[in-house]
Amino acid sequence: MGKRYSVAVVPGDGTGPEVIAEGVKVLDAAAAKAGFAIDYDYFPLGGDHYLAKGELLSPDTVARLSGADAIYLGAIGHPDVKPGILEKGILLELRFQLDQYINLRPVRLYEGVSTPLRDKGPEDIDFVVVRENTEGLYAGAGGCLKRGTADEVAVQESINTRKGVERCIRFAFDYCRRRNRRKKLTLCGKTNVLTYAFDLWQRVFDEVAAEYPDITTDYANVDAICMWMVKNPEWFDVIVTDNMFGDIITDLGAMIQGGMGIAAGGNINPGGVSMFEPIGGSAPKYTGQGKINPLAAVLAGQLMLETLGEQQAAGWIEAAVQRVLRHDIKDVAAGRMGMTTSQVGDRVVAYLLQG
Ligand code: IPM
Ligand code: MN
C-alpha cells in the first residue's frame, strides 16, 4: 500500500454535507485506484454547532486542523445566524490562522456546460485567479465612531504589506510557469485611484517579473478586468489580485464558467495546511433534497489531490467530471441536473473506475 493522507473534513452548513459526501466518495475511488489511502477526521463546525454550543472555532480545533495534510470544507453559512458571524468567525479565521495566503480559483468552461457569454466556448474560457487571501480589506482594520448617531463615522482600511503582496505575486509567477499554458500573468488592480496600495502591488509585480523572463506580464484596472472577462475572456491565463477584487472577479468568473455548481477553490498555504472548498455557499433552501450539484465539491477534491502531489489521481477525477458534464448532466444548476446529487457522484465514480 502507498501513502496515507489525513484529511480534516468540515461538511458545514446547508447542502455542505451532501456535496462533501459525494466528494469523499470520489476521492476514495481515486485513491483506491492510485494506490494511496485517505483517513478522514470530521469536524462539526458551522451554524448548527454555533447555535447549539455558542462556539465558532476553538484553539484546540485550530490545532487539530493544522495537523492535517489538508482540509476539505463544504460550506459555512446559516439562515438563523446573522451575516458575518460564521463567515468571519470560522471561514476567514481559518484562512488567517492557518496563513492560507493564496485563494486559487480556476475558471474553466468545460464542454457540455453552457455559459451566458454568447459566442464563447471552452477554448476561450480557461484561466486561473490567484487572490491574496489574508490581507486587504479583509484584515479587519478600522472601526466606527458615534455609531447610530447622525455623526457616525465608519472606517475600513485595506492592509497591504510588502511581505504579503510579494509572497502572493511570487506564488502567481511560479504558478503561471508551472501551469505552462500561455505563460501570461495579469495584475488586476486600481492604480488610477488606489495610489498607495496598488503602487506597492505594481512595484513588487515589476520587480518580481524581472526574475521570470519567460512570463509575459500585463496590467488592467479591476473595472476593465470585469469588462474583458465578459468580452474577451480568452485574453487571460493567470490573474493576480488583492483579496477584495479577487472575491468579486471570481464570482464573475464562476458565472462565465457555467455557475456556482462547478466552481471550486483552494485556500493555499504552500508551506502549511491548505483548505479546499466549493465556492457556492451553503444554499440552505436546497438542504436535504438531493438537488444540489456536487461537482464543485468534487473539483475542490481534485484541487486538493493536485496540491498534495497526487497529479495522476487528480487528473482522473477531472476527466471523469468532464464525461459527466458531456454526457449525463442536463444543466449544472441546482434542481436542473436531471439527476440527484448522489447519482452525479456515482457517475463520476463509474467513469473514474472505467477510464
Ligand atoms: C468567498 C466568500 C467569502 C469571502 C465570504 C463567505 C466571507 O464569498 O470565499 O469568496 O468573501 O471570501
Ligand atoms: Mn466570494
Image (spheres, rainbow, N blue to C red):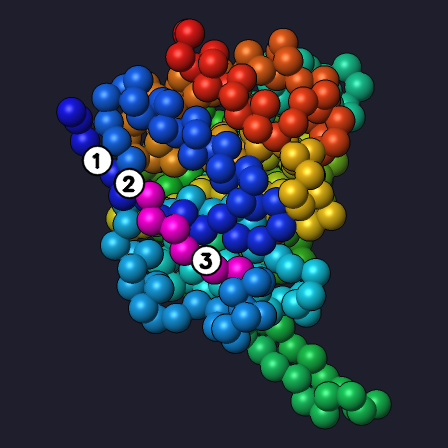
Q: From what the image shows, is residue 39 above or below residue 331?
A: below
**Foreground label between 3 and 1:** 3
Measured as percent of width and height from the top left, residue 82 is found at 68, 69
> Could you say which disc has been placed on residue 4 in the image?
1
Dividing the picture into quadrants, the one containing residue 126 is: top right
Magenta segment boundaries in residue numbering: 40-46
Quadrant of the snapshot with the C terminus: top left
What residue sits 36% from the left and 28% below the top?
A: 28
Instruction: Residue 28: give its label.
Output: none
| Identity, as a three-letter code, of the amino acid under mark 1 | Arg
**Residue 63 in sight in this render:** yes
Q: Residue at x 62, y 73 (%)?
A: 156
Residue 231 versus residue 43 in the image, above or below: above
| N-term mark: 3 or 1 | 1
Q: Report how far apart the C-alphas of labels 2 and 1 lie in the structure.
A: 7 Å
Residue 121 at x, y percent in the picture:
68, 15
Nearer the observer, 305 or 247: 305
Residue 269 is situated, as x and y percent measured from the top left of the image, at 34, 49
Tag 2: residue type?
Answer: Asp
Q: Is residue 290 left or right of residue 171?
A: right
Choose the circle earlier in sequence order: 2 or 1: 1
Q: Nearer the viewer, residue 26 or 235?
A: 26
Q: Residue at x 25, y 54 (%)?
A: 67
Mark 1 Cα within 10 Å, few/some/many (few <14, many 20+)?
A: few
For disc 3, the marked residue is 44
Dot label at residue 39: 2
